[in-house]
Image: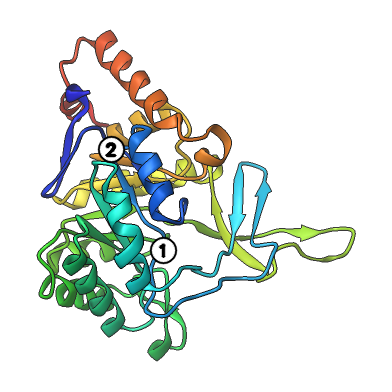
Amino acid sequence: MSKLSVKIGRLKLRNPIMLAAGILSNGPLLKQAALAGAGAVVTKSLTVEKREGSNTPAVIGVRGGFLNNIGIANPGYIDFLSYDLPIAKEGGVPVIVSVAGFSENEFVKICGAADDYGADAVELNLSCPNVKRGGLEFGREPEVVKRIVRRVKDNVTIPVFVKLGLTDRLVEVGESAQKAGADGVVAINTITGMAIDVHTRSPILSEIYGGLSGPAIHPIALRCVHQLHKRLSIPIVGCGGVETWEDAVEFILAGATAVQVGSAIAVKGLSIFKEICRGIEKYLENLGLKNISAIEKLRV
């Protein structure tokens, strides 16, 4: 798979197909994804305190994907980093810790611990509500993003990636992350949606709203990656609705260096990593390209 190897910042990946955050919850499952062919794996988002998550139903299927409101369920950062991270690293690929803070200090605290415990990188989940700002998502304010990234960078030695949510200031937020020293951005997070049971006339999700993922958001995510690529010089990781090798190549043609797969695992299982890689290899052969980096010259 050497022809598929890529670098995102300082991270070397054997292939560009990564496991997205929030899909597999523990070390053994992350290890399985790595052994199944993922180029890197991203953990569930970790918080300072243990979180039980939302009541059921928290995940439902909808046309074009899934709606979820898991409530950032996780065992707390210390438990995960001390027990699950070492197991995940046995998979032999970079393990990126997703970090969800409810204050700037919490982002710094968890990222510092992830570095100390041996994570290969951190991914900042900035879709968390900023308590000091009345619940406004951190990722919607460019200056706040810049401040968080700068503080984290000052406290860790590993690469720092920023996961961007859909906002009308997406490019501005991406530029702020870059100016603060981010090693790359991930675009995009889920998009807030809703489903109603017409018979009971009530919301289906226990928390009413949830994040929409899957094929329905792919064209939107693709547009976001394309816009970011035109303005940023740091690596971009495409995320949103990837189910086939064509979906992955679309992201690369739009400007992504790597691609994350999430919801499709629920449909296709872990075999999707090798399936997508085989498809990309065949695509390169058909175009007479020696390696995946050659696609960069063909970008839209």
The image shows residue 153, relative to residue 10, as above or below, that is: below
Q: Position of residue 213 (x, y in %)?
A: 53, 50
Quadrant the N terminus occupies = top left
Q: Earlier in the sequence, mark 1 or mark 2?
A: 2
Residue occupying the point 27% across, 46% down = 90
Within 10 Å of disc 2 (Cα), the crowding (few <14, some 14-19, many 20+) is many
Q: Which mark is residue 39?
A: 2
Q: Position of residue 204 (x, y in %)?
A: 74, 62
The answer to whether residue 86 of the structure is visible from this angle is yes
Q: Amino acid at mark 2?
A: Gly
The image shows residue 38, relative to residue 111, as above or below, that is: above
Quadrant the C terminus occupies = top left
The image shows residue 12, relative to residue 83, as above or below, that is: above
Within 10 Å of disc 1 (Cα), the crowding (few <14, some 14-19, many 20+) is some
The answer to whether residue 256 of the structure is visible from this angle is no
Q: Which residue is mark 1?
A: 167
